[in-house]
Image (cartoon, rainbow, N blue to C red):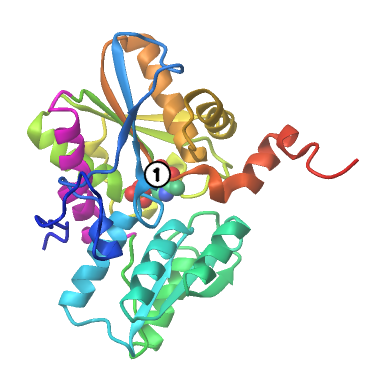
Amino acid sequence: MNASITHPSIDQGKKVYNDIFEMLPSEENPSPMVRINRMNPSAGFILLAKLEWMNPFGSVKDRPAWQMLRQLEEQGEVSSERGLVEPTSGNTGFSLAMMARTRGYSMRAVVPNKIPLEKKILLKIAGAELDVINDALCPAPGLGDGSINLAKTRAKAEKHRYVMPNQYENEQNVLAHFHTTGPEIWRQTDGTVTHVFLSLGTCGTVSGVARFLRDKNPHIKIIAVQPTEGHDVPGLRNVSQLEATKLFDETLIDQIMEIDYELAYTRALELCQKEGLTAGPSCGLIYEGARQVIETEKEGVGVMIFPDNIFKYTANMAKHIPVLAENTSPP
Ligand SMILES: Cc1ncc(COP(=O)(O)O)c(C=O)c1O
C-alpha cells in the first residue's frame, strides 16, 4: 500500500485544500527545503534543511502516522468502538491522535514521564487519553514495565478497544519515508543530493529514505547523527539503544556520528538566531553532524531532515541554556 496522497485537483500554487489530510506531504506537495547560508562552513557545499515541522501536525511523524493509520483503516482494524494505543515520546502520538480523532477513533498514548510537559499537554489537546509511566526518555522495548510493554499489554488485554500501530516494529513506518521523504529529496535536489543527514529514533526515517535513495544512486552518503549517552534529546536514541527498534538496519547507514548532546541545544539556538529557522534540539544535533562533515568534505549537496521545531522545547532549552530563563519575570 502506498498511502501518499496525490490530489491532481489541488493547485499547489494556491495551496487551498478541501481537508487537512490533503496537506500531508508527498512528492507533489513536499515539505519545504531551505538553504543554510550563514552557518555553512563551505561555500562549495550546498546545505539544505528539510523542514518537517511544516507538515500539518508539526513533525516528521505525520508521515508514518498517516501510513500506519491508513493501513489499519484499509484492514478494517479501527472503528468508532476500536481506537489506537501507542507508545510515544510525543510526536507520533500527537500526529496519530489528531488524525484518529478527526476520523472518529479514540487514541490512548503511553508516554514516559520524562517527555516535556508541553508534549503531554499537546497530546491531551489532540484528544488523546494518557498513560504516563516512569520509563526511559524514549520508549524502549524490553524494559520490564516500559511504555511499549504497557501499550502491548493494553492492546492484547483490551483487543475490542484498542489496536496498536507500533511504530517500533511497523514496516509502514519505513514505507512512509520510502514513498514520500525519499522521492521528495530526490526531486527537490534534481537528483544531485550527495549526503543525507538525519537522526535515529524508531529508524523509520533512515531506513525508508536510505532504501529509496540508495536505489537511485548508491553513492549517496547516509549519515546518522546521534546524541552522547545520558542525553535528554526528545525523540532520539543513543547508539547503544539502537538494537531496541526492529527498523534499524545498519547496512543502510554509511556513518553514525556521536555528538555531545549539549550541542543539540546550542546549535538549535544558533539556527534560530542566525538562520531564522525555528529548529528544535534534534535539528541542532543533526546540523552539528553536517557541519563537521562539511569541514572536511567541502563540496556536495547535503540534505538535513529537520524533524520538528522549537516551540515544544522551550523548557528544555532554558534548562540547558539558563540565560534564556533570565529576565523573564519582574525584578
Ligand atoms: C523529534 C524527533 N522525532 C523523531 C525522530 C526520529 O525519526 P525516526 O523515528 O523515524 O527514526 C527524530 C530524529 O531526529 C526526532 O528528532
Tell me residue 39's x, y (percent): 46, 18
Identify the residue at horizontal 56%, vertical 64% (top origin).
120
- Residue 8 vs 148, above or below: the answer is above
- Residue lying at the far right of the rendered structure: 331
Identify the residue at horizontal 22%, vertical 37% (top origin).
251
- Residue lying at the far front of the rendered structure: 14
Left or right of 284 in this view: 189: left
- Residue 37 vs 112, above or below: the answer is above
Tell me residue 279's x, y (percent): 48, 37
Identify the residue at horizontal 9%, vertical 36% (top origin).
215
Q: Which residue is mark 1?
A: 307
Q: Can residue 248 be seen in the rendering of this structure?
A: no
Q: Secondary structure at mark 1?
A: loop
Badge 1 residue CB within 8 Å of ligand 1: yes
Answer whether residue 252 is magenta in the image: no
Placement of the C terminus among the 4 image quadrants: top right
Tell me residue 104's x, y (percent): 33, 81
As rendered, which of 291 and 53 lies closer to the eye? 53
Tell me residue 188's x, y (percent): 19, 33
Q: Main secondary structure of the magenta part?
A: helix
Left or right of 199 in this view: 230: right
Crowd class of label 1 (few under 14; some 14 to 19; many from 20; radius 10 Å): many
Left or right of 12 in this view: 64: right
Q: Amino acid at mark 1?
A: Pro
As rendered, which of 159 and 12 lies closer to the eye? 12
Residue range in magenta is: 168-192
Placement of the N terminus among the 4 image quadrants: bottom left
Answer whether residue 174 is magenta in the image: yes
Q: Can residue 37 be seen in the rendering of this structure?
A: yes
Say how many tags the image has: 1
